[in-house]
Image (cartoon, rainbow, N blue to C red):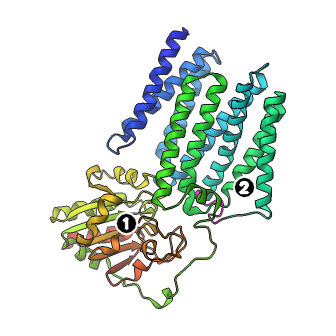
Amino acid sequence: MNPTLAGFLYLVAAVAFILGIKRLASPATARSGNQFASAGMLLAVVVTLVDRQIVGYGAITAGMVVGAGIGAYLARSVEMTAMPQLVAAFNGFGGGSSALVALAELTNGTGLASRTLVTIAISIFIGSLTLAGSFIAFGKLQGIIDGRSITTPGQRILDPVFAVAALAAAVAIVVSDATYTGWILAAFAAVLGVTRTLPIGGADMPVVISFLNSASGVAAAAAGFVIESNALIISGALVGASGLILTNIMVKAMNRTLGAVLFSAFGASADISLGADSEDRVARRGSPEDVAVTLAFAKRVVIVPGYGLAVAQAQHTIRELATLLEGRGVEVRYAIHPVAGRMPGHMNVLLAEADVPYDLLFDLEDINPDFPSTDVSLVVGANDVVNPLARTDSTSPIYGMPILDVDRSNLVVVVKRSLSPGYAGIDNPLFYEDNTLMLFADAKKGLSEVVSAVKEL
């Protein structure tokens, strides 16, 4: 392929990446943004394969067909509740691919420049660590690995030892240019990925996934320098930067620091804190009919979706209920917490699947001032993001985390299967307040009964 043409097509791909990320900033344009970025990546892959004459056209076509088939199958078969696990797996594969590219260059290259060897070491280390860490995160979210903090004896000593060994292997790559040093570095980095992810509790997994996403971008950018691919450098830098920005947004939303997430065990205690007097407190139970009457005769209702809504696949049912209420003249809006669900934007995508209008979705900062004038807040499957202890109890692990102030509504209706705590492992005093009504049920089943009751009014 003509070098000028290849350079131009790489530029087009880079522009598609940038436009794609830009359009992901809004739910209204997110779908087209994903399409832009996907088209840019497809173009970059095809140009690379043709320009470098890596494989024949038959192999390129076969790879595209197989890859597209797997992607289409995953897009249709993976449920929204499993999307964080899928993202974690994608991060892992991305990091692993970058590490393999760097290892291949180290194996096949001769007389490589020192700067190239440095970027090879960086790509192998970050890529291997991302691969191992991402699949540990996948296992925790999927339930294959215990979601609580898992530590090993002597870990505080062994982790620094592994880190020093990895650094020594990286130096050996630059000095000796030997293939085996690359594999040694990959092994130590993978071990660190495992030992540093296992101690992180389930509550912090969304942050870990976002951080590993950023790391996979950095590894890709480093691999781009190794093989002198501008498209890979640009796309990797975009992923790395956007992932880091998203990670920063998430830790701020949880009133945390990235260091605290990576090197502490928030949400990981094996013991569930139920509060000093929770056993003496009684939650006020309601029936679907009680909830139906409460909602149907309200003027302003705010719906707060959480992971329980996603697990029950109740997004279409909540949309049906909202439509019924709107038909009765009730103003219905949705409050979205930045870390509701298991990944950023989880609730937005879930509600978009049910055709909930984008202009009815409100962020925490926009909706919180309106709760005191809200008649009913309907909390479906959310827990930690509406826990008042974040404001009132300085000893709570979630103290200082911005929450949705649903407790300041005139009435709170909570749809939940039980009084079990959320990912942070602490009880929620909201459930026992005088202005809270608990509907103990699976979200889909309970909301379906409320819908039926509203129709009979």
Q: In the rendered image, which quarter is residue 340 located in? A: bottom left
Quarter occupied by the N terminus:
top right
Is residue 67 visible to the viewer in this orientation of the structure?
A: yes
User: Magenta residues, as a range?
Assistant: 141-149
**Residue 379 left/right relative to 89:** left
Name the residue nearer the viewer: 188 or 454.
Answer: 188
Residue 146: say if magenta.
yes
Identified at 28% across, 73% down, the residue is: 409
**In x, y percent, where is residue 306?**
42, 63
Q: Residue furthest left?
A: 329
Name the residue nearer the viewer: 160 or 386.
Answer: 160
Identified at 40% across, 66% down, the residue is: 403
Residue 383: say if magenta.
no
**In x, y percent, where is residue 15?**
43, 26
Is residue 34 visible to the viewer in this orientation of the structure?
A: no
Q: In the rendered image, which quarter is residue 410 located in? A: bottom left
Name the residue nearer the viewer: 87 or 160.
Answer: 160
**Residue 81 left/right relative to 264:** left
Residue hosting label 1: 404
Is 335 placed above or below 438 here? Answer: above
Return the disc, 2 or 1, that comes first in the chain's sequence. Answer: 2
Q: Residue furthest bottom?
A: 280
Is 438 placed above or below 120 here? Answer: below
**In x, y percent, where is residue 352?**
34, 50
Identified at 78% across, 26% down, the residue is: 107
Name the residue nearer the viewer: 451 or 295.
Answer: 295
Identified at 58% across, 22% down, the residue is: 60
Mark 2 Cα-neighbour bin, 10 Å: few <14, some 14–19, many ≥20: many
Regarding mark 2 in the picture, which secondary structure is present there? helix
In the rendered structure, find residue 195 and report the number of the disc placed on it.
2
